[in-house]
Amino acid sequence: MNKTVSIVVTVVLVVSIGIVFLGASKSKNYTATDGVAKNVEIKDGIQYITINAKAGYSPRMSTAKAGIPTKLIVRTNGTYDCSASLVIRSLGFQKILAQTGEEVIDLGTPQVGQPLQGLCGMGMYNFRVNFES
């Protein structure tokens, strides 16, 4: 009987932990219907990708079009954690962002297959932008 109880308790615990992690990983920047981040828009021939920095980066994964001039907008709002220390190694970019505001970073014209990776100064938080045709 003890063995059966142990197995049931273990299964319930594993399922509960899985539900908590799946629920916590969902971002407010995703729609309920398609699961696609709505943080990329094109205005006047320039593509803008918006990332929020506070307790990490949101969304963590974005997809944008390659081959058009692109700017990254990093927004902070009362950001006091290490996500305010932004590093983008491929651009040689490293900066402590304002606690509240926007940092606009010119990405040039990204090419297909050359993703952009950003991370905090401690390496705890990161985001990635994939560029597709």
Image (cartoon, rainbow, N blue to C red):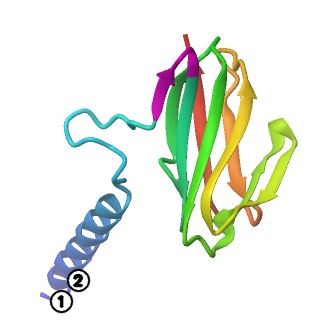
Residue located 60% across and 40% down the image: 128
**Viewer-closest of 66 and 76:** 76
Q: Is label 1 or label 2 in front?
A: 2
12 drawn magenta: no
Q: Residues within 10 Å of mark 2 (few under 14, many from 20)?
A: few
Q: Is residue 49 left or right of residue 31?
A: right
**Most prominent secondary structure in the magenta stretch?**
strand
Q: Looking at the rendering, which quadrant does residue 5 occupy?
A: bottom left
Distance between mark 1 and mark 2 Cα atoms: 6 Å
For the magenta stretch, what is the residue range?
40-46
Query: Disc 2 marks which residue?
Result: 6
Give the residue at the far right of this rendering: 92
Query: Are circles 1 and 2 on residues that touch, CB within 8 Å?
Result: yes
Report the label total. 2
Query: Disc 1 marks which residue?
Result: 2
Residue located 45% across and 38% down the image: 39
Q: What is the three-letter code of the residue carrying label 2? A: Ser
Give the residue at the far bottom of this rendering: 2
Q: Is residue 22 left or right of residue 44?
A: left
Q: Position of residue 18 (x, y in %)?
A: 30, 63
Residue located 80% across and 57% down the image: 95
Q: What is the three-letter code of the residue carrying label 1? A: Asn
Q: Position of residue 16 (x, y in %)?
A: 24, 71
Tell me the tag on residue 41.
none
Give the residue at the far front of this rendering: 44
Quadrant containing the N terminus is bottom left
Determine whether 100 is above or below 80 in the image.
Answer: above
**Viewer-closest of 115 and 28:** 28
42 drawn magenta: yes
Q: Is residue 69 left or right of residue 13?
A: right
Quadrant containing the C terminus is top right
